[in-house]
Amino acid sequence: MKQRVLQFGAVLACYLTAYLVSRQVFGIGMPFYAYTPDWAARNILLPCALVSAFPTLLGRFRFAWVTSGGYLCGVVLGELLGGFQSHLPPQYPHYGWIICIAVYGCSALAGAAVEKIGGKQVSR
């Protein structure tokens, strides 16, 4: 049980770090404003964190880390590939948000597959 709680805390700490970096470095009015990290931190970070963290309490550590990595990859890919009009500042036509959600969804499916293939859960 102790390992489950530690993993739960570690996953939430990763998401908290992502939130703080997104809001303090890439937020509106900050020196390196980026649309997707700011949008994701405001809109989907909490649900993603809960979906990623709670399975650790059931011993599904692989799922948690795959989805956490998927969230971060989704934010990065969304920012890099989401802007189709490079001469305009980031705004609603920026599709980074949908890329971020799609990558996170794919990582959730991949995490479930990794858990299924990975064998028995850890029971401590």
Image: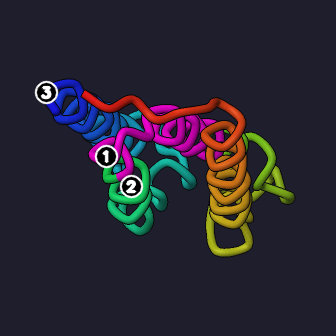
Residue linked to disc 1: 23
Q: CA distance from mark 1 to mark 2?
A: 7 Å
Q: Nearer the viewer, mark 2 or mark 3?
A: 3
Magenta segment boundaries in residue numbering:
55-75
Q: Position of residue 84 (x, y in %)?
A: 86, 58
* Mark whose residue sits in front, 3 or 1: 3
Say if the magenta span includes residue 57: yes
Secondary structure at badge 2 equals: helix
**Residue 105: percent from the left, percent from the top?**
67, 59
Q: Which mark is residue 41?
A: 2
The C terminus lies in quadrant: top left
Q: Categorize mark 3 by other alpha carbons within 10 Å: few (<14), some (14-19), many (20+).
A: few
Q: Is residue 98 left or right of residue 9?
A: right
Indicate the secondary structure of the residue bearing disc 1: helix
Q: Residue at x 55, y 54 (%)?
A: 35
Asked if residue 30 shows in the view, the reply is: no
The residue tagged with tag 3: helix, strand or loop?
Answer: helix
Q: Is residue 10 above or below residue 113?
A: above
Name the kind of residue labelled 1 in the image.
Arg
Which residue lies at the image location 72% right of the left edge and 60% below the top edge?
Answer: 102
Query: What is the CA distance from the residue labelled 2 to the residue labelled 3?
Result: 29 Å
Q: Residue shown at 81%/50% (left/top)?
A: 86
Query: Quick one: which residue is furthest to the left in this view?
Result: 2
Residue 25's spot in the image, x, y percent? 35, 34
Q: Quadrant of the N terminus?
A: top left
Residue type at mark 3 is: Lys
Residue under numbered circle 3: 2
Do the residues under discs 1 and 2 have CB atoms within 8 angstroms?
Answer: yes
Asked if disc 3 and disc 1 are in contact, CB closer than 8 Å, the reply is: no
